[in-house]
Amino acid sequence: MKYLYLTVFLVFLLIITSCTSSKKVPYMVNIEDIPAEVLTASTSLPSPILSPGDIIDISVMTKNQEVAIPFNKRLIYGEAYLRGNMSKTMEYYLIDQNGDIEFPVLGRLHVGGKTKTEVEHMIQEALYPKYLNELPQVTVWIQNFSISVLGDVNKPGSFTIEDERVSILDAIALAGDLAITGRRDNVLLVRVNADGSKTVARVNLNDKDLISSPYFYLQQNDVLYVEPNKSKANSAVVVPPTTSLVFSATSILLTIANLIISAWSISK
């Protein structure tokens, strides 16, 4: 009878453990509890911060595009280019280790540590009205905007983001989702700041408030690391051959002892 009680207890424990584990699998549990006004409110996407090593494209546009030609690294061919009769060759800016670029006419500009928006305004103010009679439209794009997802995911790797807009859920999708054994409640985010310092944060994907987290949208060069759960981590432990041999011998001895005891009980 005591073995029956033990079996029932073990089955009950297994069910409880399974239920507890299953609650750790879904993303943003109970997100429907977030007030509608919070969900419908527009979220301002932070402007990416430029750092050494970034490759950027800067375009200067005016109503009369010919006057803006000297301030573009693109090879533009006046009216023929504007009519689409000639191809263009793209040339980009590499931000050096000091955070500087060489901009046509204006010379060396310090852009490291500034947001894209700040750099666009800085160039506008430098060009107008000193060099241009109208306020130009300046656009900055990061050509090598990328993030990395490592650890217990199905397709770890680095991913280039063309539109510079990527949420933590987008990153997980690019990595083929977390493996079922990946910890969703403790994802590590490592962010390298423009000055070389690092920011480390822990993100809980189970938490419904993730959607309003300052880490919901990722920045250039962010790295996500997904830890395996205890079950997978324990299964990855390498058992030395001698230890394995001891376990095997012990198992055999216990089996023989159990057979002897059973035979002795029957004989009685």
Image: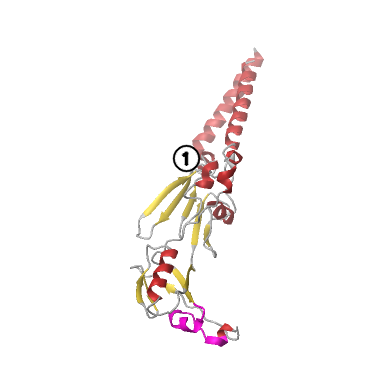
Q: Looking at the image, which is closer to me, 81 or 14?
A: 81
Does residue 248 sit above or below 219 in this rendering?
above
> In the rendered view, how is the structure colored?
secondary structure
Residue 140 at x, y percent in the picture: 47, 69
Q: Quadrant of residue 256?
A: top right
Q: Image point 45% across, 61% down: which residue?
A: 48
Q: Nearer the viewer, residue 196 or 129?
A: 129
| Residue furthest top as drawn | 268
Q: Nearer the viewer, residue 175 or 98?
A: 98
Q: Is residue 239 above or below residue 257?
A: below
Residue at image coords 35%, 72%: 109
Could you tell me which secondary element the residue under label 1 belongs to?
Answer: helix
Q: Position of residue 227 (x, y in %)?
A: 49, 46
**27 w.r.t. 148: above or below:** above
Which corner quadrant holds the N terminus?
top right
- Return the residue at label 1: 242
Is 208 covered by the magenta stretch?
A: no
Quadrant showing the C terminus = top right
Q: Amino acid at mark 1?
A: Thr
In this rendering, the count of numbered labels is 1
Residue 100, horizontal then vertical, whole percent: 36, 70
Using the rendered image of the protein, determine whether residue 206 is visible from the camera's viewpoint: no
Q: Is residue 36 visible?
A: yes
Nearer to the camera, 244 or 96: 96
Q: Which residues are magenta?
A: 62-80
